Amino acid sequence: MKTHHSTFPLAAHLLHRIDFDSQTFTDADLLWLPHHAKLQAAGRKRKAEHLAGRLAALHALQEHGSRQIPDIGPHRQPMWPDGFYGSISHCGTTALAVVSREPVGVDLETCFSEAMCEELTNGIITPEEQRMLHASGLPHSLALTLAFSAKESAFKAFSFMTTDLPGFASAQVVALDAQHVTLQFSSTFSPTLAGQRCDVSWLQRGQEIVTLLAKALQPV
């Protein structure tokens, strides 16, 4: 599969990006992955995305002196080497990965269309959050995409602290500005994290939205 690797910084971390041509993917491309047998039943699109994500993850780990390729965990999560935290995201024909010594989560989205906003708003944010997003002064489509993406990044960063799949109501947007989204966790995400806040950094590149949680939790 044809791929291109690049990097860019965000919140004092280096994000590794793989742009890939899924039309050039073949099953043989997976053979260098130690866990390739676990992907036999996956569709072509899923296989190409997985390969690109693991390539990005390998580049991110090499930055920290490791060449271990993350296996697939029991909940389909990447299994990072001992002592490392990491996160992978896919969108279209792009994959991102980041690795850290502390919990970290990254998400990549295409900015929602107005039609998507109408369809998804009630499932992503509460009326209180909607007022918060409106007060930010950002375009509604961008603000809603940021709320969705920031929650995805937060859930990835702290998924090891919950045994269930949290809903979007388990983290609430309490602040939003030109660089950060601040979230507050509820007990439905994790009793341990209830009431704590985290800052999620973000940037926009054309229609792409990238969010990254890479800061310690803040007690309220």
Image: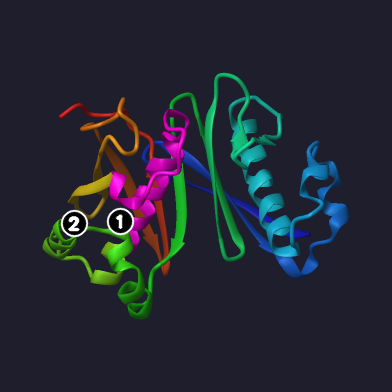
Q: Residue at x 24, y 47 (%)?
A: 172
Instruction: Specify the quadrant of the image occupied by residue 188.
Output: top left
Q: Secondary structure at mark 1?
A: helix
- Label 1 belongs to which residue? 147
Q: Please report the bounds of the magenta region as a residue range.
A: 145-170
Q: Residue at x 59, y 27 (%)?
A: 64
In this picture, is 146 found above or below 214?
Answer: below
Instruction: Specify the quadrant of the image occupied by residue 157.
Output: top left
Q: How many marks?
A: 2
Q: Residue at x 79, y 62 (%)?
A: 25
In this picture, is 24 found above or below 152?
Answer: below
Q: Earlier in the sequence, mark 1 or mark 2?
A: 2
Task: Name the chief secondary structure element in magenta.
Answer: helix
In the rendering, which numbered label is found on residue 129?
Answer: 2
Q: Secondary structure at mark 2?
A: helix
Q: Quadrant of the C terminus?
A: top left
Residue 173 visible in the snapshot: yes
Of residues 45 and 166, which is closer to you in this image?
166
The answer to whether marks 1 and 2 mark residues whose Cβ atoms lie closer than 8 Å is: yes
Of residues 173 and 209, which is closer to you in this image?
173
Q: Let me know if residue 95 is in the magenta part.
A: no
Q: Quadrant of the N terminus?
A: bottom right
Of residues 38 and 217, which is closer to you in this image?
38
Color encoding of the figure: rainbow
Give the residue type at disc 2: Glu
Q: Nearer the viewer, mark 1 or mark 2?
A: 2
**How far across and how far down the image is residue 42, in percent?**
74, 56
* Separation of residues labelled 1 and 2 (CA atoms): 9 Å
**How far across and how far down the image is residue 101, in percent?**
48, 24
Residue 10 visible in the snapshot: no
Give the residue type at disc 1: Ala
